[in-house]
Amino acid sequence: MKTGAVLFAGCKPEVAAGPDGRSIGVGVRARDVAGRDAELVRLRGTTWPGLIDAHIHLEGLAERHLTLDLTGARSLEDTLARVTQWSAGLPKDAWVVGSGWYNDQWPDPAFPSRRHLDDAAGGRAAYLRRKDGHSAWVSTAALKRAGIDRSAGDPAAGVIDRDDHGEPSGILRETAMQLVAAIVPRATESDLDAAMARALAALVRLGLTSVHSMDSATGFGSFQRLHARRKLPLRITYNLPLADLHHAERIGVRSGWGDPWLRIWGVKAFLDGSLGSRTAEMLDGSGTVRLPQKDLLEMVERCARAELNVCLHAIGDGAVRRALDALAPYRTAWRYWRPRIEHGQCVDPKDMRRFARAGATASMQPIHAVADRELAGTYWPTVSGHAYAWGALERAGARLAFGSDAPVETADPLLGIDAATAWRRRAKWYPDLAVSRGSALRAYTSGAAYAVGIEQELGALRVGMLCDLTVVDDGRVVATVVGGRVSWLRKPSPASRRSGAGAR
Ligand SMILES: [Zn+2]
């Protein structure tokens, strides 16, 4: 008779899972504990605790299956060619919606104009988000439908770029994006859910067993529908936008509500913009303040009172300092107070020790450094030595949680681990700011679990904890296990066996 136990055998260590999805044996005892009737999953490689991405945008990943993906376009011409090709298949009155363009990677990095887009989109309304999500490129028809003309004023914490004649140029920054985004037609629920399922399946293939999502209620709705149909292949901790805080307060939901597959944790707020959009708030006074200090203090106070956590997006050293100032009085607000500072791409050395004092996790995305290195050299020449400073923050006692910020960067956690460790030496870019492989792995497992208060259940290979595993062989993920069940298994390919070519 089957006991319902599963034995993951042949990997190191071997692990046994019980029918409830928890680990019942780890290492040499796993076989005995599993018993002779256990279902056997034969693997090889190293068994890690399941990898967790601590900062991801699932709606953005799903959108790639619904809208035009401009990722990787190497020039304005290349980008426009893709727009032309996509638009050709659309009705005359349809919107052209897409994302992923990245002028910093074009030979001429100047921001493009609506006129380029008008031709390529065949006169249609077009809304194209930049790779970093902090600006949008729109067509003349889109501006018209949104009622934006030369007389329109900039919204608070946003900019409508203008040309030499004072006309809107077609670039909308930060909150100005919303003026057009609000009228872009939305995908149907079933289309969104199908795209979301594809996006989640792709993450599981990368070895991810949990993610911390930074999404809107639209995404949360999709997660709930997939969960109700038992279609979640990995665990999602959802962080809601600041605009929805008053709803959370009214219904009294607290951090941790939900179940191990889908739970609510924090409230995400933007203190500043991004390096790429030149809107990171710096101590030298440059950049954009998206959430003034008065509003930030009020938010932290309300969240602490409501027993909700905070995820504070702060990229520039000025924004990081403001976040730490706001968190300082709340060291022990309540039992599961786990405030997080998201990105923390530039932290003044004087502020590094303050993370530990405030109990703040540094939620960072090492892969950003690989893409941003040259930009940082250009825009942050005097502060690069303490930018993307995982190693220095760790030495200063800060807790680290790592993620990808996908779709801004690739969600591949093995590339993230490489970026955090060996890459800095290869790139000859402040190698002392790297962390060890052990530290990087902890930031993707136990550190990320701690950042959402679930460290008793996830983030380590331990009997009694939820059995989430990532098995890696030859530098490639070979199996992803969530709750003691295989979520994804690499098909054996004879050619790839022991060639050694996959080593990172
Ligand atoms: Zn993000």
Image (spheres, rainbow, N blue to C red):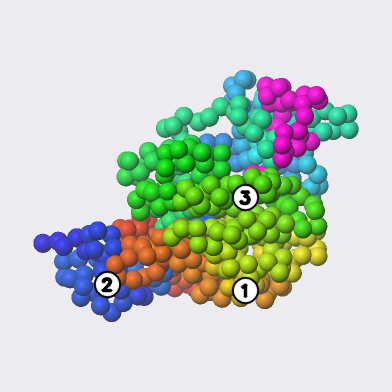
Magenta stretch encompasses residue 134: yes
Residue type at mark 1? Ala
Q: Outermost residue toward the top? A: 93
Q: Amino acid at mark 3?
A: Leu
SS at mark 2?
strand
Label 1: few (<14), some (14–19) or many (≥20) C-alpha neighbours in 10 Å: some
Return the residue at label 3. 297
The residue to which callout 1 is attached is 396
| Residue positioned most to the left | 1
User: Could you tell which of marks 3 and 1 lies nearer the N-terminus?
Assistant: 3
138 or 297, which lies in front?
297
The residue closer to the viewer here, 347 or 142, is: 347
Q: Which mark is residue 373?
A: none
- The residue that mark 2 highlights is 25
At 41% from the left and 58% from the top, the residue drawn is: 209
Callout 2–callout 1 Cβ contact below 8 Å? no
Residues in magenta, as a range: 132-161
Separation (CA) of disc 3 from disc 2: 46 Å
C-alpha span from label 3 to label 1: 25 Å
Q: Residue at x 82, y 33 (%)?
A: 162
* Towards the viewer: 331 or 1: 331
